[in-house]
Amino acid sequence: MQTEFSILLAKAGYTVPEAAAALGYSEGHIYRWKRGDETPREGVLRLLSMEADRRKGPEGNAFTFVDLFAGIGGLRRAMESAGGRCVFTSEWDKYAQQTYLANFPDNRPIAGDIRQVNEAEIPAHDVLVAGFPCQPFSIAGVSKKNALGRAHGFDDETQGTLFFDVLRVLMHHRPAAFMLENVKNLKSHDKGRTFDVIRRKLTETLGYTLAEPRIIDAGHFVPQHRERIVLVGFREPTGFTWNDLQLPAYGQRRLRHILHPENGTERPEGHFTTGPDAMVSGKYTLTDKLWAYLQAYAEKHRSQGNGFGFGLVNGDSISRTLSARYYKDGSEILVSRGAGQNPRRLTPRECARLMGYDDSFRIPVSDTQAYKQFGNSVAVPVFAEVARIMTPHILAITGAEALRKVG
């Protein structure tokens, strides 16, 4: 159970060292107040409450959340659209951190490798969101609990995997809800054994109520076929149902909605587009050598009865799934430039649009890194809709908890 102090600490956005410095007490005091071992003075709570109110801003915030395996912040954008406020971010890749900070200039550092972060150092929060990598689960290897000096007993099947780190944060903080994202085949991985471990740890071990996993295709929101599995769970039983999900008609958005118009109706941007008509830079057009190779490769597999090959698209198309390997040759999504002309790759700005980021999203990294980042990102509108239907149930739990504390 979170203490009043830990809730205010999260709302104020302070880490333990920051709270110690701001309040004029030792970190030991902060930890004891968080755990409920001691009760802080009323003045301490009042100061924290004032800081929390200041940080809410004019619109306020419905709930707090932590962003694990954050990438460039797609899940954060989704949760913020539902009124959430991020109080902690973890992402190990330095280039993803660069893009994240360019778009979310928090007055706190991004934590790196989550495996090196003590869960007690993470602020209290209402919701945990994570697009955790899916590694094979095994009981082999060195036990993470031994390395961290703990013996919780819940890591027997997850040690050495990054899902372990999701579990230990959930176990320590007991947030009201979580939203996890992964590839579509998570349920079938290792003949279903991987997902069975995930389900049992979240429900039987940690006691969360897990909604039936839902696979959502981003093609309802953006012109891209991209299926991802979504896991939503709550600390207490709620009336959450996927029936509340509102999905636009599949395919109503086509690539023409995200491609550069090249007619002067948008401003040139960096090296993506040039000239008064904002024409796509020639650097994105495939060389004769690469285009010949891709055509030969596709023909070779076609003659063998395989479906491998490039994906040629135009403004009326819905694209294949954008992947992190797009920087290599762009073969899964090649934009036609007309008969007799070599096709081109999407620009990074078009990739951003394809993932549901608006044009205010800053792209401060190289094209290679940008392609990797957008290929690894979530489609933002999909998870914004999930966040929307989660929010009333999050607030029902956190509101009831607040009433119990007052009472």
Image (spheres, rainbow, N blue to C red):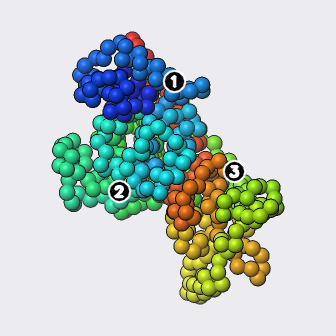
Q: Nearer the viewer, residue 267 or 288?
A: 267
Helix, strand, or loop for circle 1? helix
Which label lies toward us, 1 or 2?
1
Report the residue marked by disc 3.
249
**For mark 2, does the 10 Å Cα neighbourhood hold few (<14), some (14 to 19), or many (20 or more) residues?**
many
Q: In percent of the image, x 65 and y 55: which residue is there? A: 353
SS at badge 3: loop
Residue identified by numbered label 1: 54
Does residue 87 appear to the left or right of 170 in the view shown?
A: right
Going by the numbered disc 1, the residue's amino acid type is Arg
| Left or right of 388 in this view: 271 | right
Whether residue 224 is visible here, answered yes or no, is no
Q: Earlier in the sequence, mark 1 or mark 2?
A: 1
- How many numbered marks have been drawn onto this rendered protein structure? 3
- Comparing 60 with 132, the one in front is 60
Instruction: Give the SS element for disc 2.
Output: helix
In this rendering, the answer to whether 406 lies above or below 329 is: above
Q: Give percent across and percent down for residue 211.
A: 46, 42
The quadrant of the rendering that contains the C terminus is top left
Residue 115 appearing in the image: yes
For the residue marked with disc 2, what is the amino acid?
Thr
Q: Residues within 10 Å of mark 3 (few under 14, many from 20)?
A: few
Three-letter code, disc 3? Ala
Residue 390, placed above or below residue 327: above
Q: Residue at x 80, y 62 (%)?
A: 277
Q: Quadrant of residue 352?
A: bottom right
* Residue for badge 2: 194
> x and y percent of residue 127 in the render?
44, 36
Residue 343 or 249: which is nearer the viewer?
343
Residue 6: image quadrant is: top left
Location of residue 144 with respect to 306 vertically, above or below: above
**Image disc number at residue 293:** none
